Amino acid sequence: MESLSKKVFLKLEMPNSQNTKGDRDKIFNALKEKYGNVTIPYKIIKELYPKCREANFEITVTLVKRDYDWVVTRVEAGDTTDKNYGLCVDLGSTTVIMRLVDLNTGDIIAEESIFNKQIAFGEDILNRIFYTRNSAEKLYEVHKATVDTFGELLDIIGEQTGVKGDDISIMTVAGNTTMTHFLLNIDPWTIFQTPYTPIFNQAGFIKADEIDIPINGYVYCFPSVANYFGGDVVSGILFTEIHKQQSLSAFIDIGTNGELVMGNEDFLVAVAGAAGPALEGGISKFGMRARKGAIDTIKIVDNEIKYTTIQDGKPLGICGSGIVDLLSEMLLNGWVDFSGEIKDGASKNIIKVDDQLAVEYASREESENHESLIFTQSDINQFLKTKSAAHTMVAFLLEEIGLTLDELEEFYVAGAFGTHLDIEAAVTIGMYPDLQRDRFNCPGNSSLKGAYKLLMNRNLLSEIDDIAQRINYIGLEDAKDFIGKMRAASFLPHTDIDNYPSVKAKLIKKGLL
Amino acid sequence: MESLSKKVFLKLEMPNSQNTKGDRDKIFNALKEKYGNVTIPYKIIKELYPKCREANFEITVTLVKRDYDWVVTRVEAGDTTDKNYGLCVDLGSTTVIMRLVDLNTGDIIAEESIFNKQIAFGEDILNRIFYTRNSAEKLYEVHKATVDTFGELLDIIGEQTGVKGDDISIMTVAGNTTMTHFLLNIDPWTIFQTPYTPIFNQAGFIKADEIDIPINGYVYCFPSVANYFGGDVVSGILFTEIHKQQSLSAFIDIGTNGELVMGNEDFLVAVAGAAGPALEGGISKFGMRARKGAIDTIKIVDNEIKYTTIQDGKPLGICGSGIVDLLSEMLLNGWVDFSGEIKDGASKNIIKVDDQLAVEYASREESENHESLIFTQSDINQFLKTKSAAHTMVAFLLEEIGLTLDELEEFYVAGAFGTHLDIEAAVTIGMYPDLQRDRFNCPGNSSLKGAYKLLMNRNLLSEIDDIAQRINYIGLEDAKDFIGKMRAASFLPHTDIDNYPSVKAKLIKKGLL
């Protein structure tokens, strides 16, 4: 195991007249041959006496690999090498997911997620940023909320497993640029002000107690590349390894923001921007996150809507994958036209609400709260912006690198959204490109998985810096005619249907073209 | 200048849409090419905003060289590279000497010394160790006394020069094993208990605030080799470079303890032990340190004692060099015999006090306190132990390495004692070997000078570890028949006068042999 942290059992000579080396130096000498650059901090030296002698110099040393050395974080009496734990965290602005990992085996012992307590300072990340502006006290409140989220997750995991913070020597965190700033109690204000530069990209290894994280060791945050291109995406690239392939891959992550990387072993180019809240379900009154009662799939069969819900709950609303399905099915069944306009009278589900057309996908009788669940024309218009942003980012980057869609051999759709989404539907509405379907790859939570990967392979540290270094990031504000291109892409699937031959074929078959 | 700490002025791009790197990363990238492994600690990252932007990214970065990296200790607005200071300290159990050094030029801006405030817990180092035993609170008191000594020196130097702790990024400290333990607030108890092992030899770079030293940077303590062989001697070796010569050298430091190293580029071997308090003037009622009013040289001319005092003060007592002179002159003038016994009637200065013979070297009328200043038979007997220890260590090590005195090309006599001492007299009484006089070398305070040398040459860090590693240390407790050998050497100059041919010649010339 090449984990970021190791435990080493040492059986050293007790002090004797033949060996009068200092306690610290005996430990150092025992480690340096195998580990090279070893640092024993003052705090540890101070604890050695009488600990080592009382333990007859049979001790276990915990080491954490940092950039240039192995640092000793703990010395325990006896052999405790079997208890060697690390954490990896996906620090989302909405949800924080934490895994407890046995560093000896790589086993995932526990995985828990809770909402980010920052939400108390605003659902929208911008509200949190405005809240903390120019106030060290308020910044600390949001920092504290982040750290408390970690603390609660640690408590839950501790309850489940009996593993306490003291036994955890390393934590890897993948989060976006703003989240990482908040975690480190550093003002993210500049990230959202022109020219959109963060205070740091790479923060290096930070002693957990310096940022109030209750573990006995170090915290490593994945570096960001730019304002909208955070450590979570760098972690995702690390996981999918698009940076190591000969063939061209794309990696897209559409959440609150949208990030797209394209490249291979020779180059990496990226765009990112605010994709809009569509895919966290924030567009529609009934949009919701993918939890119990969210409609996650929709089919229109014989002009009737059929849906499923998460955990078979009574319908509460619709999540991202449900929206994509709904739009796709409406298009294929002639309920909307190519511009996304709802066709009045196309179905009994098409109704008028407050002077605008809407589709009712679940009736008052069916829904949990006895409300008619609808998706309105303006919901559709909102959503089309998001889906066209996804399309346009891909088209834009392909143009930038001078390659065509055919040359895109892997298309990674990251995030929870990618996992639940029906690729066929997403292509149908022109959100994702019309590639052979086997070129799509849904790695799931690649941010968390990249953080886990690093935890178990310290050799990736330099690879991470290399990825961040190599990415040629283009801010959408610099992307020429992006708005114009987005407008063309806001059709279903696109103003130029020839970009979507498989969709065109389907529409022809259905007699809609 | 290859100083341990550097200041670098950086003129970086202000954030702009072409350069959206984080503030921290711009600094890192600007430094890494020249400095390689650069660490920017969390505390510094946290301070960057709005500092860098307010300074238009014209900033000065202070870097300290540690074992494996350069660590940033400070970021200031504007160009402050002209203010770049370090300290070196000789941490003695009696006296602490501090130098303030301009790291840009190597100039010594100030040098001050005061008594070690530890003395409040015992003149004798053993009393201090017993005081702190098993009590973290008492240990802290003695630690605090040490640190307060540093603080007072800093205050004095600050008053003189205007340089404050904030402007000082590095301090090198050379002290014996116990002193270094006290400085780091680590119990030195084990050093004086069989098998005499310290808690640490090398402590590495310690953040000054971790040990309450009021500078803004790091503290480096010279490593010890063993209980009685401390960082002060390692520093002395570094200064004299005996470890780099082809020819054989000896380095001896006689203070509270005695340390002797012999060697060259191929080997280093050492003995050390408690030499007794003789040479700090602690033997005699009138023994005193080398300060104003101490008799520091004595000649007997026409059977009359002629002396000088330090700073021409009225005589208060006698310091180490005065004692050596006194003994040497008494021997050469027939006032003592070869066994050190005072000859009654040899001079009007030979008097009887409390049933024992004594020599009065300054009369009641001459002395500051209107006391007769005397050196008694038992003072002599005490002193002979010390001088014979010095001789015996040299003889012992030569025997160990199988070489003869003739092969000893340099004989370094370290410490303030070495500087004031008359070598001729020290050879006459058999304290130092009868070498050609040009082989003697008095480097002065080589402990402080070695600490200064490191301050100005960071490349010596590994050399220091190398010296400490190479020294083959022999505890006097393991030296066979050391006591027997010491007894033979307690004669003036030695039971075997043929060991001292130049002294033999003098005695014959004087008709004493």
Image (tube, coloured by chain):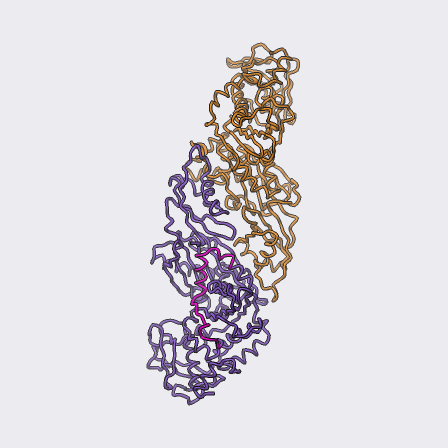
Chain colours: A purple, B orange
Name of the residue lying farthest toward the front: A246
x%, y% of residue A3? 44, 54
Above/below status of B405 relative to B471: above
Q: Residue at x 51, y 36 (%)?
A: B224
Any part of residue B493 in sight: yes
Count of labels in the image: 0
Left or right of A295 on screen, residue B424: right
- Specify start and end residues of the magenta stretch as a single range: A434-463
Name of the residue lying farthest toward the top: B345
Q: Nearer the viewer, residue A179 or B230?
A: B230
The quarter of the picture where residue B339 lies is top right
A441 magenta-colored: yes
Report the quarter where the N terminus of chain B lies.
top right
Q: Residue at x 54, y 78 (%)?
A: A486
Above/below status of A291 relative to B202: below
B52 magenta-colored: no
x%, y% of residue B473? 50, 32
Left or right of A62 on screen, residue B458: right
Q: Residue at x 56, y 65 (%)?
A: A267
Left or right of A50 on screen, residue B165: right
Any part of residue B115 in sight: no
x%, y% of residue B40? 55, 53
Report the quarter where the C terminus of chain B lies.
top right
Q: Nearer the viewer, residue B79 or B506?
A: B506
x%, y% of residue B162? 63, 44
